[in-house]
Image (cartoon, rainbow, N blue to C red):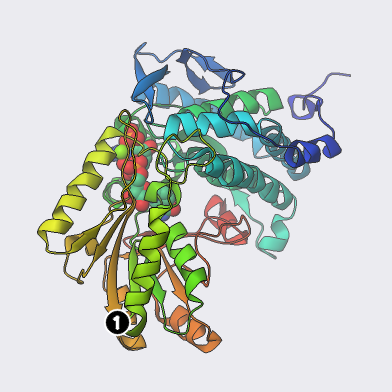
Amino acid sequence: MATTKKNNIKKSTTSVSSVKSVFQNYAPAPESIDHIQLKSQYDLFINGKFVKPLSNEYYDTINPATGKKIASVAKGNEKDIDAAVKAANKAFESWSKTEPKERAKYIYRIARMIQERAREFAVIETMNGGKSIRESRDIDVPLAANHFFYYAGWADKLEYAFPNRNPKPIGVTGQIIPWNFPLLMAAWKLAPALATGNTIVLKPAESTPLTALKLAEIIQESGLPDGVVNIVTGFGDCGSALVNHPQVNKIAFTGSTPVGKYIQKAIAGTNKKATLELGGKAANIIFDDAPIDQAVEGIVNGIFFNQGHVCCAGSRLFIQENIAEKVIKKLKDRMRTLIVGDPMDKNTDIGAINSKEQLEKINHYIKLGQKEGAEIFQPECSVPANGFFCKPTLFIGTSQSHRIVQEEIFGPVLTIQTFRTIEEVIEKANNIPYGLSAGVWTDKGSKIFNLTSKLRAGVIWANTYNKFDPTSPFGGYKESGFGREGGVHGLLPYVKF
Ligand code: NAP
Ligand code: MG
């Protein structure tokens, strides 16, 4: 009997129990990277094959902890995007009709393969992006696998997500992602699009293409039909070509607010659907009845996790005035214990800044904060001489009009303001163009409910911070964008009725 492509899932080399043990015995010793297979040159992934860019141009991708080149990566352009979109359009004909339970198998397979190669993914993510190996290993990679597992589960249950509405896939989706969570953002985008029967052209950020390309290898091995997922590396013009391609029916974008605004203008009147996950400047609010030590941990995690390259980073701290002195002292003491340095070292708390440009931007804001008259605190700590690093930084005595309070710095820089009343802090927290996330620290449940209804933020954490799960929707208000990713809500942008 002839085998059809849809049944062509390759046999797994690992049983479910051994996948479990991969995680249980997962002792990364990440300092050793000898076994990691890196190529010297990476091509585009189009129609199930790795192909050279039509221009034959490549660019260097670097390790931000050393400033040294890791590999050459294909610089895709408008013509490569066109080839990828055409492949995705062709693949849509059969993928959209593939039985949902078959689609689920492929997605589940991809999740399993990420787990099996978790260590490799973690090391590459850290080498290419600068984040600490602890975070890549414990957060980025397992969460990426979990997103595929979670949406694999939805593929054959869409009628329960949208009862009596007969959801149908949209077609070719163009997905554009940033450099701060390269693998995880790829998973956030690909998993729901695949589960709902769409095909994809993904454009990774120029500075962090390597884990997306590793994922392309897995996708190829998984037997997913050719053209269902295409990955085109390149610069902003490559993203723009994807946005403007007439055969792309939906854009899913995570990145900066200026590029989000450009996309919104570019697709106006085209009938393309879009979700935009943009910048943020979150308020992290601590009341005098909060468990202070726990809150200080949450504040530190809120701003220094991933070097502060986090759209939902708790970058504006609001402390109730009567406990300000105590909280600031504890915060400074905790900051003195943070280790800045080699991201491959499992003791490192703050790894490398993602790029030279980003470090320059952060340093510009640090100078600006001092010029604006705020008091700066940076603990004494050693920072590697090569690569791009930044000490954890605190600005005390900032006010609402300071630019360091209003603008997204996207680095390990925290501003502190104080407040007396709940009304005052709500007003200040909301008085900003962004509305992605917020944190509240208090012992009183009633205060939490009061604040969650009044803070204009898509995600609000109470007595914790930066907790992510595939079941939870994520997205913003105001200039932080629109649409939700994650959870059952994350299926909606990928279906039509
Ligand atoms: P970015 O400059 O907006 O880039 C994001 C992606 O868009 C990259 O792949 C980029 O390619 C591409 N791009 C650039 N210009 C484009 C254009 N004209 N048309 C189409 N695509 C274009 O953002 P970033 O600097 O990578 O990431 C940091 C920003 O992302 C921050 O503002 C952060 O808050 C936001 N972010 C938001 C979320 C969220 O969920 N809300 C999550 C993470 C990050 P290049 O890499 O070649 O420039
Ligand atoms: Mg950029």
Q: Nearer the viewer, residue 123 or 449?
A: 123
Q: Is residue 440 left or right of residue 383?
A: right
Q: Is residue 193 above or below residue 463?
A: above
Q: Say which residue label 1 marks.
A: 419
* Vertical comparison of 428 with 129: above or below: below
- Horizontal placement of 33 versus 479: left or right? right
Image: 442 above or below 296 = below
**Extreme-right residue of the structure:** 1
Question: Which image quadrant shows ligand 1?
Answer: top left
Q: What amino acid is labelled 1 in the image?
A: Phe
- Answer with the quarter of the image where residue 148 lies: top right
Please indicate, yes or no, whether residue 273 appears anywhere in the rendered image: no
Q: Is residue 417 left or right of residue 66?
A: left
Q: Quadrant of the C terminus?
A: bottom right
Which residue appears at 27% of the width and 65% of the height?
433
Front residue (pair 249, 323): 323
Residue at the image position 72 percent from the left and 36 percent from the top: 112
- Indicate if the residue with disc 1 has its beta carbon within 8 Å of ligand 1: no
Where residue 366 sits: x, y (%)?
20, 51
Residue visible at 69% across and 36% down in the picture: 115
State the quadrant of the N terminus.
top right
What secondary structure is found at the residue carrying circle 1?
A: strand
Q: Is residue 205 visible?
A: yes
Q: Give the x, y percent position of residue 28.
A: 64, 33
Where does residue 438 sit, x and y in percent of width and height?
Answer: 42, 68
Which of the 4 quarters of the picture holds residue 22?
top right
Whole-percent x, y for residue 389 in the image: 32, 38
